Image: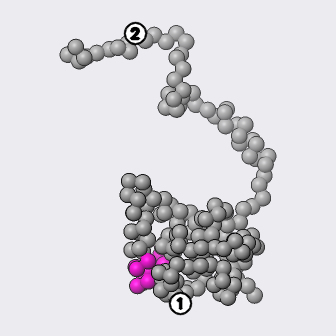
Amino acid sequence: MSKTFDKNRLEALKTDAYENIESYNDPDTPKALEKFTSQIKSILQADPKMLHSVPEYLPVALFGRVKFTPEANLKWSGWLAKNTMPVWDEFKTSVAFNNADLPLVKTIREFNEDLLIESCAVLFMLNHHIAAAPGPRNTEDDEDDDSDESSFRNDADDDYEGNEDEEEGYDNQYDEITFNREGR
């Protein structure tokens, strides 16, 4: 019998990994993510038990370094749609790891093969911006939310959003107030 993905866990891993990646993706320090992933790889290789408390670090460490062929994209889409975890023989032919990452991959496989597969599922999801298992959408609820949005609008927020229409009867006599010795 085949194993299944835990949809909630995949979504949580994806969200946590994405937040970590974004926090290090800073234009002011372009090498921050690269440095962080390099450090995390060596730490995880030395102590994979760390993944018990921060499992999202594995997809972060492998982010941008795992490739999926067009054929593999179809397989991963199918596995995620059916919520079926691939067996190792299917999995190993569906991902291409960077050679420099193979020691880490081997260490993690020995530690927890399912976590390695889950992490690659998360990487696939991040690469394709998909949800783990999108449920059926109720379009009536969506329409109601959109139409009600304007009824909850707060006009006081307009000043903060750049909508600075002059109020009728506004008296600007106090706009140019200066204090003693200011601006003279």
Distance Cα–Cα, label 1 vs label 2: 76 Å
Q: Which residue is mark 1?
A: 110
Image point (64%, 63%), residue name: 128
Q: Is residue 106 visible?
A: yes
Q: Mark 1: which amino acid?
A: Glu
Towards the viewer: 68 or 21: 68
Image point (43%, 65%), residue name: 33
Image point (39%, 68%), residue name: 35
- Disc number placed over residue 96 in the picture, else none: none
Task: Report crowding for label 2: few under 14, some 14 to 19, many 20 or more residues within 10 A (C-alpha).
Answer: few
Q: Position of residue 117 (x, y in %)?
A: 61, 79
Q: Is residue 69 left or right of residue 181?
A: right
Q: Which residues are magenta?
A: 41-54
Q: Position of residue 163 (x, y in %)?
A: 54, 26
Q: Nearer the viewer, mark 1 or mark 2?
A: 1
Image point (43%, 61%), residue name: 24
Residue lying at the far left in this picture: please name it.
181
Mark 2, secondary structure of its residue: helix
Q: How many marks?
A: 2
On screen, residue 28 above or below 47: above
Question: Going from the N terminus, do you reach mark 1 or mark 2 first?
Answer: 1
Q: Is residue 10 visible?
A: no
Q: Position of residue 167 (x, y in %)?
A: 53, 16
Q: Position of residue 135 (x, y in %)?
A: 75, 61
On screen, residue 28 above or below 70: above
Mark 1, secondary structure of its residue: helix
- Disc number placed over residue 173 in the picture, else none: 2
Q: Mark 2: which amino acid?
A: Gln
On screen, residue 16 above or below 118: above
Q: Which image quarter is the C terminus in?
A: top left
Q: Is residue 33 left or right of residue 122?
A: left
Towards the viewer: 99 or 159: 99
